[in-house]
Amino acid sequence: MATAGGPTLRRRQLGAELRRLREHAGKRIEDVAAHLECSMSKISRVETGQAPIKARDVRDLLQWYGVTDPELTEAVMLVHKGAQQQGWWAHYNEVLPSGMATYAGLEADARVLRSYEPTFVHGLLQTEDYARAVIAAVRPNEPYEVDQLVRFRKERQALLTRTPEPLELWVVVEESALRRPVGGTEVMVAQLEHLAGAAELPNVTIQIMPTAKGAHAALAGTFSLLEFGPREPTVVYVNSIAGNVYLEKERDVRTFIQTFDLVRAAAPDPQETPITLERIAREMQGS
């Protein structure tokens, strides 16, 4: 089993291994829930990496599943230990929206992130003023939380310049999102300039989907593809006002990969991005 990554990825590795061992032992989720005297939803969340599990319960399950290999037991417990560690984002747990801590952990472990953004500039590419305007619109009467969430977003952006392996980011953003004067004209023009600078990074690719393009494959909404390496499955993250959804089934992931490929093929070449950003900025300033 894989034993690399931060706490969020390790929790998912642990859950996947416990699920594999349960199925190999011929046990059902309801059997495990009865054995540990907890709900089936708790077991389901443990096996999908969404909930923690105590070390003694892991050892209990390994024994119950008939695991006799001491090396496998040691490997599973090592992953469990790693899953209990806290990432830097834990400092912001009191203000983070539901599910955001999980996303931050996955993002931190990802090698490649591909995203379609129909409404806003991607969080990893936002200026502080733009981010503040977006967050304050959702939490207008909570200045402390706004400040904390802006700091959280800025810390996430360090992934683009981390060493030795910065996150590889590929974003397709709708032109209409860049024409929305979030925070006012001055803030938005600065944001456009920031995007132009980010596009020069060797690990960042930005494409702008023209409004005049009409219908395309991703009009249903925003989504991200997080890739971790050959031994870990790609995760699809779909974010909406109703909540967050993570998809890992091969069929679902394949559908979103195909969708992103269609979208980036339909969008203009990344080399045109600086020209488009400059044009939008000029038009926004009325010049």
Image (tube, grey):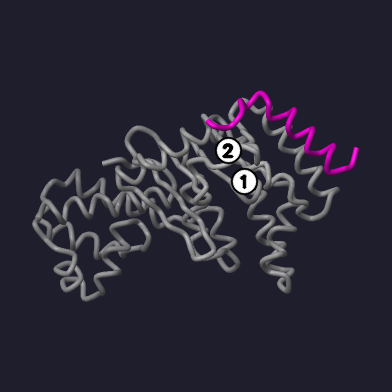
Residue 8 lies in magenta, yes or no? no
Amino acid marked by disc 1: His
Do the residues under discs 2 and 1 have CB atoms within 8 angstroms? Answer: yes
Q: Distance between the residues labelled 2 and 1?
A: 8 Å
Judging depth in this view, the residue of 108 and 249 nearest the camera is: 249
Mark 2, other Cα within 10 Å: few <14 / some 14–19 / many ≥20: many
State the residue position of label 1.
122
Tag 2: amino acid: Val
Find residue 171 and name its label: 2
Looking at the rendering, which quadrant does residue 250 occupy?
top left
Residue at the location (75% across, 38% down)? 194
**Image quadrant for the C terminus?**
top right
Sooner in the amino-acid sequence: mark 2 or mark 1: 1
Q: Report helix, strand or loop for mark 2.
A: strand
Predominant SS along the magenta part: helix
Compare residues 252 and 101 and report the one nearer the observer.
Answer: 252
Q: Where is residue 227 in the image (x, y as percent from the top left)?
A: 43, 38
In this view, the residue farthest toward the right is 287
- Residue at 19% x, 43% y is 71
Q: Is residue 272 magenta?
A: yes
Give the x, y percent position of residue 186. Answer: 85, 48
What's drawn in magenta, residue-wise?
266-287
Q: Position of residue 134 (x, y in %)?
A: 70, 58
